[in-house]
Amino acid sequence: MKFINELREGEKISGIYLCKHKQPAVTKNGKPYENVILQDKTGVVDAKIWDPNSQGIDDFDTLDYIDVIGDVTSFQGSLQVSIKRARKAHEGEYEPGNYLPISEKSIDGMYEELLKYVHSIKNAYLNKLLVKFFEGDEEFIKTFKGNSAAKTVHHGFIGGLLEHTLGVVRLCQYYSKAYPVLNRDLLITAAMLHDIGKTVELSAFPMNDYTDDGQLLGHIMIGTEMIHDMAKEIPGFPAKLESELKHCILAHHGELEYGSPKKPALAEAAALNLADNTDAKMETITEIFRSAGDNKDWLGYNRFFESNLRKTQCGEE
């Protein structure tokens, strides 16, 4: 079996993978097919069963481990698997630990670095707020360490939420030194809390899917409510400070069409939006190039970047 990050266009695929998602669909010509997402510890890949009623396709469901045979192709710059044969694998044929994607970085090491930023906050109210979340709430800490930052787009692995948050905090730390107009305590606090709503929006692995509250409210609204509820537990927490912090959370996607109910009105909110966008996009393009392997040619049009992509070739012999 090849891990998903080792798959290359034009190859045959044969091995056991976790079926993360399965959904029937219909082509423009009215022919039924099935959308499938295959997963292992290195990531996910989109797959199609173009002839679901053929003899080689056995019944299986979401979260089943399936033994598949197929072809690795490419669609709009991303790998895609055309499944020719599939059967439900039996217990003992696979090792479950091979199918949960996890950060390549030390989760404990990243969390330790994050706590250093918590302790660097001088504002007493913001410091207490962060301590309550990141040191005082064991259930929150467990979920925060284990969740992804997104379902598929970027940091979609165990520890992804922590890794993304730390990446955003590091960028905001740089911004706070480069631009004196920024209130460092507010900006770093907002960076640490900007995606805490994803601990509720997304379910734990192996599902890593939207919960009911995730569908109905979204992580921005959920995170803002979490901050409000925690701030109420801190006597004398200034109302204006809470409003400015919540504004940063509400505006961190930058645009109304990207899911933010408010556009940035504070320098800290603008900086947080830039840091969040930078870390998400750089991780996304990193994952795209990683999945491309040694392919240094143009990868085709990518919908997320709205551009044809390829790796840099300058400086090579």
Image (cartoon, grey):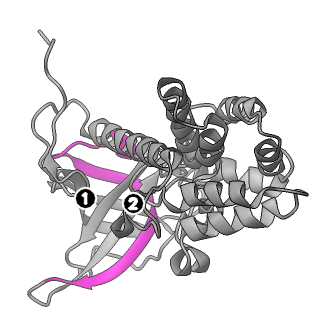
Which residues, given as a range, are shown in magenta? Answer: 1-27
Find out whether residue 185 is within the magenta segment: no
- Residue found farthest to the bottom: 30
Rendering quarter of residue 115:
top right
Vertical comparison of 187 with 147: above or below: above
Find out whether residue 15 is within the magenta segment: yes
Q: Which residue is mark 2?
A: 38
Q: Residue at x 15, y 83 (%)?
A: 27
Between 168 and 210, the one nearer to me in the picture: 168
Between 86 and 105, the one nearer to me in the picture: 105
Q: Which residue is mark 1?
A: 81
In this picture, residue 304 sits left or right of residue 279: left
User: Which amino acid is tagged 1?
Assistant: Val
Vertical comparison of 58 with 168: above or below: below
Q: Residue at x 48, y 73 (%)?
A: 62
Image location (x, y in percent) of residue 114: 68, 35
Q: Which quadrant does the C terminus fall into? A: top left
Q: Residue at x 31, y 61 (%)?
A: 46
In this picture, residue 76 sits left or right of residue 243: left
User: Which amino acid is tagged 2?
Assistant: Leu
